[in-house]
Image (cartoon, rainbow, N blue to C red):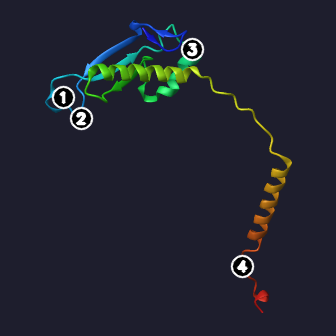
Amino acid sequence: MLRITDTILIADWELTETFVRASGPGGQNVNKVSTAVELRFEAARSPHLPDPVKARLKRLAGRRWTQEGALILQVEETRSQARNREIARERLADLIRQALVAPKRRIATRPTLGSQRRRLAAKANRAGVKAGRGKVADDDLT
């Protein structure tokens, strides 16, 4: 079981871990031991997450979300398989916690009277500057 909050627990059947060989440093060990972890969370089929949370999680996951509705996290930060596994589970928990927070709805406000007047004055000033440009007539040269 993976505890996200006091009310949300992710069951073990929803998580699948596969271990693959990691790239990067590791000496001779890198060719022998599969230390990188690929954590797969079946988010779309999860009964523990409400639908709005799943939608926000999908948006947060981006390319890590598969067409089948699974979230895949890959971790190969350390040379330890156990530590990579912990990091992957922590990242999944953090991602789900972020998805639990519903965004605040924006309340539309009207511009103040002063800001409207300043905007119109700036527009009139700019129009005057542009009106002063242009070709000069011959009679204005003398």
Report crowding for label 1: few under 14, some 14 to 19, many 20 or more residues within 10 A (C-alpha).
some
Residue 30 lies in quadrant: top left
Quadrant the C terminus occupies:
bottom right
Residue farthest along the bottom direction in this orientation: 142
Q: Amino acid at mark 3?
A: Asp
Which residue is rendered at x = 63% and y = 27% of the image? Answer: 103
Check whether the beta carbons of the residues at disc 1 and disc 4 lie within 8 A of each other.
Answer: no
* Mark 4 and mark 2: Cα distance apart in space: 67 Å
For mark 4, give the secondary structure.
Answer: loop
Residue behind mark 1: 30
Check whether the beta carbons of the residues at disc 3 and disc 4 lie within 8 A of each other.
Answer: no
* Mark 3 and mark 2: Cα distance apart in space: 39 Å
Q: Position of residue 60 (x, y in %)?
A: 50, 27
Badge nearest the viewer, 4 or 2: 2
Check whether the beta carbons of the residues at disc 4 and disc 2 lie within 8 A of each other.
Answer: no
**Which mark is first along the chain, 4 or 3?**
3
Q: Can residue 66 be seen here?
A: no
For mark 1, give the secondary structure.
Answer: helix
Pick the front one: 126 or 140: 126
Q: Position of residue 38 (x, y in %)?
A: 33, 21
Residue behind mark 3: 51
Identify the mark at residue 24; answer none if there is no mark. Answer: 2
Q: Position of residue 37 (x, y in %)?
A: 30, 21
Q: Amino acid at mark 1?
A: Val
Pick the front one: 72 or 123: 72
Which residue is rendered at x = 84% and y = 51% of the image? Answer: 114
Badge nearest the viewer, 1 or 4: 1
Looking at the image, residue 108 lies above or below residue 47: below
* Mark 1 and mark 4: Cα distance apart in space: 75 Å
Check whether the beta carbons of the residues at disc 2 and disc 1 lie within 8 A of each other.
Answer: yes
Q: Position of residue 59 (x, y in %)?
A: 52, 26
Report crowding for label 4: few under 14, some 14 to 19, many 20 or more residues within 10 A (C-alpha).
few
